[in-house]
Amino acid sequence: MSTAQIEIILIASVVAASCALIGTFLVLRKMALMSDAISHAILLGIVVMFFLTRSRASLPMILAATATGVLTVYLVELLVQTRLVKEDAAIGLVFPALFSIGVILISRYAANIHLDIDAVLLGELVFAPFDRLIVAGRDIGPKTLWLGLSVGVINLAFILLFYKELKLATFDPGLAAALGFSPVLIHYALMTLVSVTAVSSFEAVGSILVIALMIGPPAAAYLLTDRLPVMLALGVLLAVVSAVLGYLIAYLVNGSIAGSMATMTGVIFVIVLMVAPQRGLISRWSRQRRQRAQFAAEALLVHLSQHTGQPEFAAECAVTHLTGHFRWSEPFAAQIVRFARQRDWIEESDGCLRLTRAGTRVASQVMVRS
Amino acid sequence: MDRPLALEVRDLTVAYEEKPVLWDVDLEVPEGVLMAIVGPNGAGKSTLIKTVLGLVPSAAGQVRIYGQPYARRRELVGYVPQRGSVDWDFPTNALDVVLMGLYRKIGWIRRPARRERELALESLAKVGMAEYADRQISQLSGGQQQRVFLARALVQDAQVYLMDEPFAGVDATTERAIVALLRELRAAGKTLIVVHHDLQTVSEYFDWLMLLNVRHIASGPVAEVFTADNLRDAYGGRVAFVTPNAGSENGHLSEPQSLLSRGG
């Protein structure tokens, strides 16, 4: 693997970790859409700053884009405060407006310069290694890598320092305000960091991958754990895995790097959604299946105990009688009889089901409970 | 009255878009009472509590806690929000939620230490939830979640407690446990202000009462305030089966259905 390839993977991993860290709080605050809004709206800031300075210098761009990101959040809140528009609609109104002003400006005045829409959406990860950071005559690596690292460190420091405040303001903003921890201040601090992260990541990986990395890995991590620190760590891990696997797949199929990385975040999410130990769909299905079998078997025990010793028992105890009495299908009836026999609740002789002593006990417990 | 006023509200008006939710409300709550705020849906009960805490801006009026504005008295006030106001799927456990009550004492940036954890555990024990400390909060029942919220307020070690419907949606055991806890706090000299919904239990649980319906209808000792006339004023003359102060064991006090459908 060439140095450039390793550098691309490093850049993508750093950006991925950074996005997942801050994205965890977006997911928990039910503000996932805000990543969409901010990562698109910052285009306007970048374009305007480009016209003002006629350069693509990083720092002014980042400042302008961050300001646009925060402006987006503010405009959304203004709209919501009118109580005429709900938050999701407000987000959908604000960012396309800002983004499209940016698009018009580019197409009208900057068509021949290096700022194009494809790059905005998908980034230019392939070219990232060519833009080097030279310090005192020495090449110390791609600029994008250093930028990503700096933002990652800022995000990590912010979350470590204000972990308790972020948690409180996210879980219970009312109490946060009552205790004097301004949830508005914390909200805007977080949104500023989302903007900084989006703009610093977006040149490398584009806005679509920024959204995918901010939401996909944390959303998957949320299904895997009950603890916030673990969720943060898992989000970062899954994001980095998505980036690395995405790069390898892009390399194998010779396709878009950002595209396959974003795809990997989706693939990983779907896998987690299926197999997560407690909240996953498969575990939920099998739990429901078990509960259904448990309930049906208990119903069977109660039915048998009601008729035990009665003259009609010979008719009621027949295995074939179950399909009629409970309206069970034959396979289901067979499954329930098997379920109950495995637990030694019933025994079968000559096609007649009888309660064992354990079964009698369970039946009476069930009746007491209900 | 020689007791100091734990809470004093003067001419408080709160409006959402020019529509008054609280209109010129006056209230004096002496120290050491266990008070219910009662009124129909949309009467502004929660809004009153939130305005006292500065969570909702007021259009006019003053709030004083032991003679000072809330911002200077934060450490004296414990708050129990409505259980439904937070997302119980949040990835954290019961102990961690209780610890949040100590965040102000801990201050910005610093983390809870062992001493704080012990306090939080003691507090959980007081509400009978010690063995659930490590339990993920979404796995708790509604009553258990309410107890965790109470433990969080207890750990604040406040003088004045504001509670927004602590009895809503809890089982009978939890309700008894909460009442016992409230009485214990009152015995320790705390002041408790509780938004309450169930007219049947007012006389049994509380010794002080405020009837509210956008305006202040009446407030004072339950024996004086809990009268048919006052209730009619508060509920717009539609409380059909009121036999107040006739012993709540056999009196049938209930809000007629029509009141429940009023917008909140």
Image: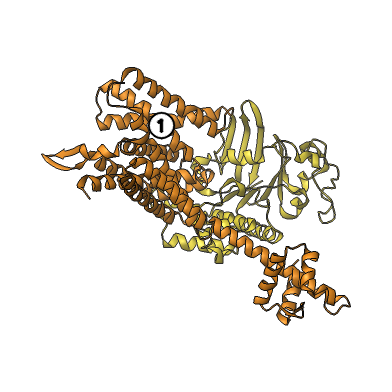
Chain colours: A orange, B yellow
The image shows residue A190 at horizontal and vertical percentages of 41, 40
Residue A104 vertical position relative to residue A172 in the rendered view, above or below:
above
Q: Please name whichever residue, A94 or B208, is drawn nearer the observer in this view of the structure.
A: A94
Packing grade of label 1 (10 A; few <14, some 14-19, many >=20) is many
Q: Is residue A157 visible?
A: no
Q: Answer above or below: position of A226 versus A152.
A: below
Rendered location of residue A84, percent (x, y): 59, 27
Where, by quadrant of the figure, is residue B42 drawn? top right
Q: Camera-side residue: A319 or B160? A: A319
Find residue B247 and report its horizontal and vertical position in percent: 83, 54
User: What is the x, y in percent for residue A22?
Assistant: 40, 44
Q: Look at mark 1 in the image and give the residue it sits on.
A: A40
Give the residue at the far left of this rendering: A137
Q: Amino acid at mark 1?
A: His
Extreme residue toward the top, this view: A108
Q: Is residue A314 left or right of residue A43?
A: right
Circle 1 SS class: helix
